[in-house]
Amino acid sequence: MPNVTIDGQTIQVPAGTLVVEAAKPLGVHIPVFCYHPKMQPVGMCRMCLVEVGTPRMDPATKQPVLDENGAPMINWMPKLQAGCATIVSEGMAIRTTTPTVVDARRSVIEFLLTSHPLDCPICDKGGECPLQDHTLHYGPGKSRFYVESKFHNEKSVPLSPLIMLDRERCIQCARCIRFQDEIAGEPVLGFADRGRGLEITTFDDPPFNSNFSGNTIDICPVGALTSRDFRFTARVFELNDHASVCQHCSVGCNINIGERDNTIKRITPRENEAVNEIWLCDKGRFVHHFAHAEERLTTPMIRADTDLKPVSWYEALTFIANRLRPALSEGGAKTIAGLAGDRVSNEDLYLFQKLFREVLGSNNLDHRIGWSQWNAGQELVKNFGAGVGTNLGELGKGTTILVLGADPQNEQPVIRLRLAKAAKQGANLMVANGRVTKLNDSAKQSFVYKYGEEASFLFGILRAFLDGQLEKSERANVDANFALGLNLSVADYAERAGVNADALQQLAANFALSENGIILFGREFMFAMQNEPALEAALNALVVLSGHFGNKNNGVIALYPHNNSMGAFDMGILPNGSAGRNALQDAGMSAKDMLTKAKVLYVMAADPARDDPKFRNPGFMIVQDLFLTETAQKADVVLPAASWAERDGTFTNTERRVQYFQRSLEPMQNARADWEIVQTIAKQLGAQWNYPSASDVMNEITRDVPQYAKMSHERLRVTARRRSSVQTVGGDSAEPVQIALGELFGDMSGVQWATVSETNADAKFEVKFIAPKADGNVAANVPYMAVTRSLLDRGSAIQFSQIVQPRVPNANVEINSHDAEEWNIADGERVKITFEMKPPRVLELNAQVDGTVPQGTIAVANNLQGTENLPMGARVKVTKNV
Amino acid sequence: MFEGLVALVKGMLTTGREMTSPPVTYQYPEVKKPVPPRFRGRHELKRHENGLEKCIGCSLCAAACPADAIYVVPAANQDNERYSPGERYAATYEINLLRCIFCGFCEEACPTGAIVLEHDYELAYYDRRSAIITKEQLLVAPPKPNMGTPRVMPDPGNLYAAIPPIKGGTEPVNIVEMAKAKQ
Ligand code: SF4
Ligand code: SF4
Ligand code: SF4
Ligand code: SF4
Ligand code: FES
């Protein structure tokens, strides 16, 4: 740990620290443009120049030479050094306030401004612009140039449908290029030309087509890259920033909602080093227009004769109560069912299940519908979820990460960034799926197994554990039949799974011997788990026998599709599990059964009619949503719900982190928060509920759900700031400028709940073998269709954001080149895909022949134009369309 | 007694003099008092010589206003619908004259000299709503009738400097032409 002296103050910093970083804890400010703490230094802009010296050494004694005062004598380097590219060494001295440094800074600013327009008043960066700030602090204060004598360049160059480039404003720091290369791993930006003509271009077609392109807007230190969504809609200093959480996927990125006049103007990342650092994907950033859509429901409606007609809340609630009471007494609770989407908050879900379990007396509850219908692995998460304190972005050497059947690039985008970062820091990232995804780029070892043979893949690893005596059984109760069940050799299992046996052996050894181990499993794996009970048992065995559970940086992460899928499990929106993840003996109807057997259906924030065209109104149906969804059109009562921006609450992300989000907007007309609606219905039915606010509901959750004890809103709002003590979420909202300046706080907020293996250190876990189902009905030569998901699709929220529409991809079918040859299909040709199902279904799509799918598999993204409601796991026939 | 008489005569003389001197009362509203040149009355939004609006919708006036009386919603100029030089203009511009304290800070903050507190002081309204004056009311008439905004500019795709160069007067400068000329 070298000691360095900066402007007379001495500090000890870890070896390898850069001068700019060493200065921060001392409160010494070294201005930067091209340097950013999240990226490698390049030393391009020279703004960070400082005087650097090293102690003079006596060659004989190898000791520093001391002056008459006993202080070491310093050899000052003859020229200024770039603080962002200089690594500290023992005894180094740095001066940042000398006239030479002041002069250098002034000159750099003046030089940058010779080709910088006088645009601050109309520039979207104005007010949070590092160039403005630094010019004010370190600039010459007076210009020696007239505007006419400045260099001018093209303005308003659309770099992509989302981002506008102003070539005059670019100061050529390459932060945007480096972000795309180093962090997003999608190197689609570059410099063209030289000198003053140097300009940012995109090599991509369609232009700048990256899932993370919006982040370049934040880190660009000037207004060269601006959001075409936010462009010229407000000045940044007019916005009210509200601390919120993204609700588009299960990562739970922390966001600031920039609001003006009760309208969302922009969404920017809010730093949370444990969740999203300072990044967002383009869905989270640009898809917010639905909150203000004209189509929003603004009043309750009830069905009169055949049409839905607007009524007051009072009428709607009386109508519901009058219809529910008789239904309750006649059919009993058995025929009343509740379907809740897993996008609403924990408070909503908790009251929803309380209404059903306590007021209506029914366990007919479920959330597994739409993308969430495959949500599985709840026992694994409850017992072995990645330990409290796990931070994917901090993983490195000594950690093995195994990712099974997931496509985080499209489904949990920011997790992909964090896994790539971990791999870069030395973590051993191993990826296994039935196809190749973007994550494979970062993997140390990749496996492409045969879809349907996931169990063989895991059995192979387990067999290798047993063969190599790699298993750790201190906390395992291994069933006697376990070893007997695994009756094939590693080579045989590998062959079944279609992977290399040696590589599988190596994976097993790496995982078992690694200091820490984390397993992430995604939607495709969960789908397999639901079809094959052996798989969950095998995954359970893998976790228990590897010993990777029960502490930080160990355990499993289930990559669920939605922002609060985890909360839906925690709050017990399940027919067979109550709040707190307790199993229920007398299970109710699952979502599938409800759609056929229920007589009364209460749907909160779900759209079963869109997901299943056969869906009918079961008799009496209440729907509570933002929009008149297909289900709502069939309902008897439609209730307008408030969007996530119009109320507060908590979401639990896929790493079990419970996060609080503030209310940012006034609710639209008559819309009410979901928990509020549930409460009024309960009161109509005679329940004595009294929850004046969402935090009162949360207080009850803290008492009722052991995992959530102590998670009151007050506690969740606290953010730990490494550099400036404790703040509360929303207490300080200067994030955008801090991100641009590269002066991060190291914020973290939210609380993870502890799993069984953590809270009960003595607990032992069963390891069982379940024989896989014989898969006799599948002819091996019939292609398997993998259903994929793209970041932006035709989802109900996305369709209101015009700006992202050009980025919604066209549907096509990915075909392996060998298959394409065999089927006589060329790239780009029209093909016909016939499903082996009844009634027959045919898709016509363009072929994309590439290496992302293995032979015998095709992949089609769901929910694009023409690919709605694709069945998972279908066997298909592929022919050329003539 | 004599002294009293002198005083009376003096008084009457003053009265007589004032009776014959011209009146100081203005017959407002028929007659209006001219105001000093730097008088700060109701604001006006000025135009360039070619009729484009000087206001570029930057909200700096609103930020400077101590009474929070100004409300600006900006938007982007289009080629066939240009309001101001540069890329941005004020789509909505409102001043609440009941809040305004006529301090002139907005005028000082404005980078283009668009907003000027002029000499209109007749600021009475029948209701509070009409004390909020809109862009249409604030904007001065174009120098020639065919110079109004929005308008189609002859050179689509070209951008004008939002803030006119210091030396170049008030004519918006086509910066693309300028860059070309230099090369
Ligand atoms: S990038 Fe910064 S300095 Fe340049 S015009 Fe915009 S606000 Fe002003
Ligand atoms: S566009 Fe912005 S981030 Fe990219 S090089 Fe230019 S100034 Fe840097
Ligand atoms: S990764 Fe997920 S949570 Fe994060 S911004 Fe994107 S959609 Fe939102
Ligand atoms: S009047 Fe001036 S300061 Fe106000 S918005 Fe217009 S240009 Fe900006
Ligand atoms: S050279 Fe150091 S910040 Fe740019």
Image (cartoon, rainbow, N blue to C red):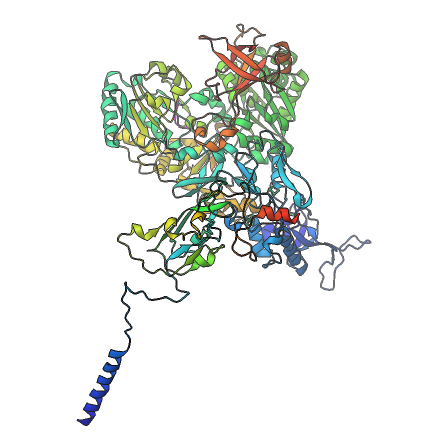
Figure quadrant of residue A463: top right
Q: Magenta region: which residues?
A: A570-579
Figure quadrant of residue B15: bottom left
Where does the image place residue A81, in percent across and percent down from the top left? 70, 51
Task: Identify the image quadrant of the N terminus of chain B.
Answer: bottom left
For the image, the number of numbered tags is 0
Residue A85: tell me if it is visible: yes
Q: Is residue A648 above or below residue B175?
A: above
Seen at 54% across and 32% down, the residue is A414
Q: Nearer the viewer, residue A251 or A41?
A: A41
Where does the image place residue A281, in percent across and percent down from the top left? 52, 33
Q: Nearer the viewer, residue A246 or A478?
A: A246
Horizontal relation, residue A393 to residue A693: left or right: right
Figure quadrant of residue B21: bottom left
Q: Nearer the viewer, residue A551 or A80?
A: A80
Secondary structure of the magenta portion, mostly?
Answer: loop
Seen at 45% across and 18% down, the residue is A869
Residue A243 on the magenta segment? no
Residue A575 on the magenta segment? yes
Residue furthest bottom as drawn: B2
Where does the image place residue B124, in percent across and percent down from the top left? 29, 57
Horizontal relation, residue A785 to residue A839: left or right: right
Residue furthest left as drawn: B1
Where does the image place residue A17, in percent across and percent down from the top left? 65, 45
Residue A279: tell me if it is visible: no
Q: Is residue A528 above or below residue A673?
A: above
Residue furthest right as drawn: A60
